[in-house]
Amino acid sequence: MERMEGTTLSTGLAKGVAVVVGYELQRTFVLAKVDERDSISRADVGLECERMDGALKRSQEDLNTFTSAASDTPSLSAAVELLSVHATMATEIASAVKKQISSSLVGVEDALDSVISGWVNRLQKLDSDYLREREIDVRDVGQRMMRHLIGVAPADDVEFPQEAIIVARELVPSDAIALANSGVVGIVTELGGTLGHTAIIARSLGIPAVSGIRNVTQRIAIGATLLVDGDTGFVTAEPTDDQLVAFAGCVADAKRRSIHESKIASGPCQTLDGTEIALYGNVGLQGDIDQVLERGLAGVGLFRTEFIYMQSKDRPDVESQRFIYAEMAERLGDRPLVIRTFDLGGEKLPLFLSLDRQSGTSNTNLRGLRFSLGEQNLLRDQLTAIVHVAQTANVRILFPMVIGGHDFSQAIAIVNEVMHECGASKRPLIGAMIETPAALFCLEEILELADFITIGTNDLTQYLLAADRELSSAHENVTVMHPAVLRAIHQIVTSAQQCYCPVCVCGEEAGEPEFVEIFIGLGGRELSLSPSRANRMRAAIGGIDIAVAKLLAKQALACRSAQDVRELFSQGGRSRVQNELRQSSPHLLASSP
Ligand code: PEP
Ligand code: MG
């Protein structure tokens, strides 16, 4: 038996048989030195270019086959979008390869190796985690074309045994897509981040996945029985009988929970006393709307539009954005679509702007709204697309990382100008994200201008607690449950309510039931969270007694550390509070004695 701990990429439990994907399949592209490459004669250039075209054609055929297979599965819409990105990439790679063949007089394999290595090296050097993750897409496409060139069957044809758990150093996105309907029940890898496509696809397929286990392909033997716990990140190889029994118990519990949660998924979302809580979805890709609809959510509370920019090679134009927003809004019907304008800058930079940065022409060190105000043409294009769609749909604008009345009013002025230019008469509601300490100190002036506000707990927590949100997520005190963050949220909710300004909370921890109980206790009534967590949240909210939540929130605000706040919940705090209320003011309790 070996128990290994990794990072969870996709939640859920799986028991199965290890299928170790051989590393040799995953050809690494190593830039051969030019003088080591075999040169070709000018007369062979045409032939080598034709071979490239042939490999491109066969690769495009593979991608088309995947697309048709994946198009029937709504949860795979993210994958379908990715496949079209791969198809575009393949065309660009092939054209760069052909140029290289004729300029350097090298064979097609060497040219492909060189082009892919060049792209990969450039992406690896970028500051952005997101773009570094895109390097795997380039390798995936390159690998596919290389396999066709050298006549090795693409790995897509591999048949998996029943209940297979894929163990690999890393999976390239198209490997992950090929897992749909393949009977694969789990994924364990050494590499792969939570922002990566493999994680996104595993989540949309509902396959538990764990990454970050060193030397995983050597530590797990082919055919070994594996237990994958995507909730905690533990993987057990060759479990003992006791571990198998305990795991079966967890699987049965999870099944019961999920049946219970899906039963209440279609009903209203309300607390024990019938207070309605509006549950919205956070989305990043067009296809995520499927889950918002499937889970009966009240709309989209946060559409992170920067993904559109991150996936695009060129500046997205007004028309293409208009198409995306209109399609999403149409699918939502009357439900609101809150479009957050691109939150770029700092480590989040699309390729077209990274190139500007290398030439020193971009203001990319700024973040959020300041970055957008420095990239006014980009912002104007996005606002123009939104304003157009908002004339006939329930679309709202949300500006990221507002720091005060000054930057917020500049942004609003641009909306007004854009409306004037478009001849638009209906002004969409405009909101501000409250996620910086500056916004806390300038709350009044922001509230004077805002139609609604949204609390971004991810950034608010990192900036208030001076902790990097990517690196310190495992630290017990770096959480929205820290009293400093809770007090900030209390202040925001109270001020917003005084101005009758709707306030919603989003951010990863908006999906944590204990935080939500405090938030509701503080007066919050709107949440936006990852749709995959909605059923669980609806069930948790159904058990909340507002009177208990209020008292718990009051006690949490008086705590000294996040640990103390958690102890409030873990050490029977909720029933203690319930008993206190039962003694002092039983009429306040919705729960029966
Ligand atoms: C946040 O900061 O909480 C938030 C929702 O925005 P993002 O995670 O996109 O920065
Ligand atoms: Mg944020």
Image: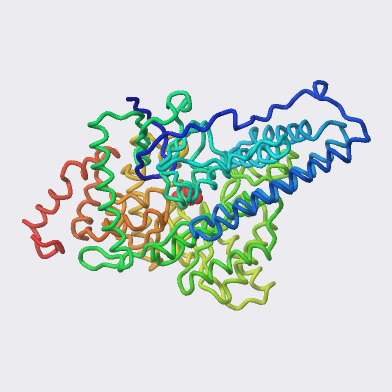
Q: State left or right for residue 319 relative to residue 80.
A: right
Would you say 589 lies left or right of 482 here? left
Q: In which quadrant is the N terminus drawn?
A: top left
Relative to residue 485, is residue 528 depicted above or below? below
| Residue in the image at 26% along x and 57% along y | 521
- Residue 525: x %, y % from top left: 33, 63
Q: Please, which residue is most extreme toward the left here? A: 583
Colouring used for the render: rainbow
Residue 510 position within the rendered picture, expressed as x and y whole percent measured from the top left:
37, 52
Give me the residue at 84% from left, 38% from top: 48
Considering depth in this image, is 270 or 230 the residue closer to the camera?
Answer: 230
Percent of width and height locating residue 193: 50, 38
Q: Is residue 169 shown above or below 298?
A: above
At x 36%, y 29%, the residue is 237
Q: Is residue 209 visible?
A: no
Quarter placement of the C terminus: bottom left
Q: Residue furthest top?
A: 36
Q: Quadrant of residue 411?
A: bottom right
Q: How many marks?
A: 0
Query: Residue at point 43% right, 40% down?
Result: 164
Q: Nearer the viewer, residue 333 or 200?
A: 200
Left or right position of 500 against 324: left
In-front residue for pair 262/355: 262
Near-viewer residue (571 or 550) = 571
Q: Where is residue 22, by image quadrant?
A: top right
Q: Is residue 193 visible?
A: yes
Task: Estimate the x, y position of residue 407 in percent, counting from the top left.
Answer: 57, 56
